[in-house]
Image (cartoon, grey):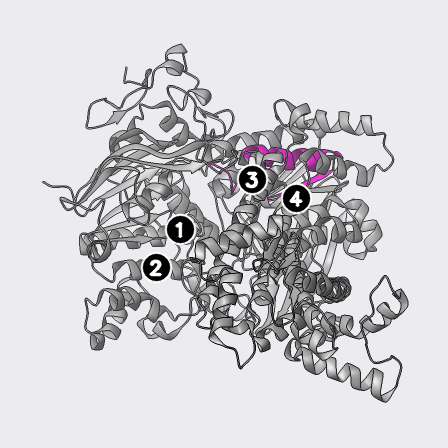
Amino acid sequence: MTPILEVRDVKKYFPSGSSRLLQRPTGQVKAVDGVSLSLQKGKTLGVVGESGCGKSTLARILTRLIEPSSGSILLDGEDVTRLSGSDLRRMRRDIQIIFQDPYSSLNPRHSVGEIIATPLRIQKTVAKSEQAGRVKELMHLVGLNPEHFNRYPHEFSGGQRQRVGIARSLALNPKVIVADEPVSALDVSIQSQILNLMQELQTKLQVAFVFIAHDLSVVRHIADDVAVMYLGKIVELGPARTVYGHPTHPYTKALMSAVPVANPVSGRKIGRIVLTGDVPSPIDPPSGCRFRTRCWKAQDICASNEPELLDRGDGRVSACHFPELEA
Amino acid sequence: MLIFIARRLLFALALLFAVSAFTYVIFAALPSDPAALTCGKNCRPEVIAMNRVRLGYDKPIVVQYGQYLKGIVKGRTYGASEGVHCPAPSLGYSFRKHQCVTDLITRSLPVTASVALGAFVLWMLIGIGLGTMAALKRGRWPDRLATGFSVVGISLPTFFVGLLAIMVFVIWTGLLPFPRYEGITSNPAKWFMSLILPWFTLAIVSASSYVRLTRNGILEVMNEEFVRLGLAKGLRRRTLIVKYVMRAALLPIVTIAGLDFAALLGGAVITESVFNLPGMGKLSIMAVNDSDLPILVATTLVAAVFIVIANAFVDILYGFLDPRVRSY
Amino acid sequence: MTNATPLLSVRDLHVSFKTNDGIVKAVDGVSFDVANGQTMGIVGESGSGKSVMVSAIMRLNFGTDVIVSGQILLNGIDLLALPESEMRQVRGRDIAMIFQDPLSALNPFYTVGYQIAEAYLVHHPKTPKAQVEAIVLNALDKVGIPDARKRIKSYPHEFSGGMRQRIVIAMALINKPKLLIADEPTTALDVTVQAQILELIDSLREENNSAVMLITHDLGVVAETIQQVMVMYAGRTAEYAAVQDLFDTPSHPYTQGLLRAVRSFDQSTRGSLVSISGTPPSLINLPEACAFRPRCSHEKGPLSACATQRPELRTIGASQSACHLSADEVSRVQREAFSK
């Protein structure tokens, strides 16, 4: 089956630093450095990593908000990497984005009705006379009161605003929605509401999600596959059940154990892997394996040879010289 | 940091070239024939043709521009044998006034500079002073007074304030003599007296927006987390306002002030006209009325030069004031 | 924990703001104690009033439009009654703070060495320069900043997020305060750095024998290092308990809901997550009733009292809880949903 979204060896380098006289960039930030992924119709791919891992850059590449330096993106089998003009606009119907911050991603001077209708107006997929009806239908779908279409974003709570963002992203019946940390800015009691809503919508509409998050616990329930990123590269990728059940990359393992568990007995410092130091700067990543500076298993080979993504069974790959394989 | 400055200056130099070329081309593209403008109404075609050759207007624009630049560096003789020589830096020759443009400008510039400098100092004092007071006493009467002043100041046109000032201080009360410009070297006291009214007029009009900028800047910074942390450390309110708040709040104002000041050096057209000051603004207005192209090119160019220099200066200053800019 | 005089004792604290739409009661009658050397946790979501309360304790943003009443007793002295000059001596010396986002909390225009030295010098003026420098270096060393001698000349933007928070901690602890208030100290940090920072705060607390007040929205963070917890909702105390009791036998329906929501995240099965329906109430003109009532999923309730009477904090089981439900009813729910 053709995947609905396929990413082949995508790279994005940003120029950085300009200490010379005529502002020629001295270095590059390898924000995304050779990422390949695929996503089936109606499924969810979780992309997890900490600051600087390139997950947000990836989200922007997928939605073509920025162009990759190299590599290609296939949407439903069609190469959309170099589209422009009207072709690009047509492609945007099929892939939409939900942003992290529901407070800054909605125009405060537009009513939520106008916000949700904007994609309809731009793409002209729905006749003008039917727009109002479609907006109300969408609001109902995401659990908002359709009578409130005249209200402004500031009259809604954070969770409700994120529902507006979801309604907007659904307006054009996209095949793929990229959700960039859609619940990170929300309260715990609201996070689960939004996650449940996204799952319901997926079942109902068969839309595929790329779900980007900074910790593993959020995507656990929604993802079919999980990709763990570190400094622009995928370190582990596979079916969620497999990755969560038995992480093979030390970073995945550390990331899983870092999330504080809401239970004093089991949570407190039992089997906890505390990594030392911060994530290194992506401007000057470590040689060889990028995780080696914080890894407790690092050996000489890790500094000299970059590990490749190798098959570890059960459809999962990971990039490590000393993977945690099952005994 | 040195590299940063060098780069910035290099950029300014390149920009200056571009600006001068652009200015020159724009004026050259005007439909009026510069040669025809060199003599009066009843000009004979032979004279026009002769002047065209004398002034080099018969040559292609690039050559003209090249000669113009050369004139700036080396000085230039206008006309062939009995021509007029303008020493370097020559910005052209005005046939209307029968003078080298550079001389006209060196006479006007000090006037404008006097007006600009005094007004600038005054308006920064008023603007930042009132703005700070308004922010610190937010919602109370000093705030209302200052914001009221800024609303009135912004809505009043310069010529109105100027004329009103003359009416009140010169005609009605006679507190000040009618301003007649006097050079600072010839008579400092008279120089000062003649400039009081223009200074205040310009300052009041310009300070208004600075009151707002300062007030809003300070209020914004006061909500910053680092100010709260400073307070939580136990710092005095006064220390906090000077060291933490003002420094951060005034930074963006530096940029605007630098550019505003530079723009003023190009000529405070209305103020100079109202107070009859023979500055750059007055010179430009006269040149426009007389269609005196060489003067217009020169005044435009001088104004542009000031803006470019101020821009570079502000950027470099910013590098000193904000460590985040420096480390680029 | 209650036998000795508490270090900090907050009594019936009210903080309200006047806005165009009405009065916002951000903190509405909250009382709690922090004992010497103890770690006290305050948990609440956005709008629960926890951060406003911190500002009130430190008297950080007292403008004309903020009204504060009640008592904040530090070793028996009411901070609200102190003149500003004496309150300034308390800030940074007796009580110090750590903020959520270390980047915006550090002044971008000064080197970190200068900022830490400044924190020391406010309370120890006229200390010789060399001595201050030694103290600053020692502080940076303690929080684990490598190469401190070189790094004191760096500006905040030249550090990573975790390092910045370490600097803020060094600054907070430089005067060995009796109480450290940490307002969401790990929220802005990467997950793998969170644990480092929490451990650092705890080890320094032990070393200095100071008390810590940890404000957070994350029940997982509470479980890490805390002894006593207060759960806030809509500016009021919902539940107040020892941490083990709170996790084992939560009494308030809000706490129960939160715990269920968080735990459903940790379970490995794919499927629907437990959530609390509805949204937090607006704090403008909040009625004298249970603030949680519109979202309360308790099968018996909401009782008629919930709509008319504000529940007072009372002992239910091992906790103090502000809920009208009977103790029997609460323990039945606890048995069914929270027994292991």
Tell me the kind of residue under disc 3: Arg
Left or right: B131 with respect to A206? right
Tell me the kind of residue under disc 4: Asn
The chain under label 1 reads A
Give the labeled residue for mark 4. C107
Give the labeled residue for mark 3. B7
The chain under label 4 reads C
Mark 2 vs mark 3: give the one in front. 3
How far separated are the C-alphas under marks 4 and 1? Answer: 27 Å
Q: Is residue B197 visible?
A: yes
Work out whether B303 lies above or below C93.
below
Segment tinted magenta in the rendering: C162-190
Residue A111 location (% of width, % of height): 38, 71
The chain under label 2 reads A
Residue B246 location (% of width, % of height): 71, 54
Q: Is residue C335 visible?
A: no
Where, by quadrant of the figure, is residue C84 drawn? bottom right
Give the labeled residue for mark 1. A100
Q: Residues within 10 Å of mark 3 (few under 14, many from 20)?
A: some
Quadrant into which the N terminus of chain A falls: top left
Residue C114 location (% of width, % of height): 72, 36
Work out whether B118 lies above or below C152.
below
Does mark 3 fall on the same chain as mark 2? no
Tell me the kind of residue under disc 1: Gln
Secondary structure beneath dot 1 equals: loop
Secondary structure beneath dot 4 equals: loop
- The answer to whether marks 4 and 2 mark residues whose Cβ atoms lie closer than 8 Å is no
Mark 4 vs mark 3: give the one in front. 3
How far separated are the C-alphas under marks 3 and 1? Answer: 38 Å
Tell me the kind of residue under disc 2: Gly
Give the labeled residue for mark 2. A165
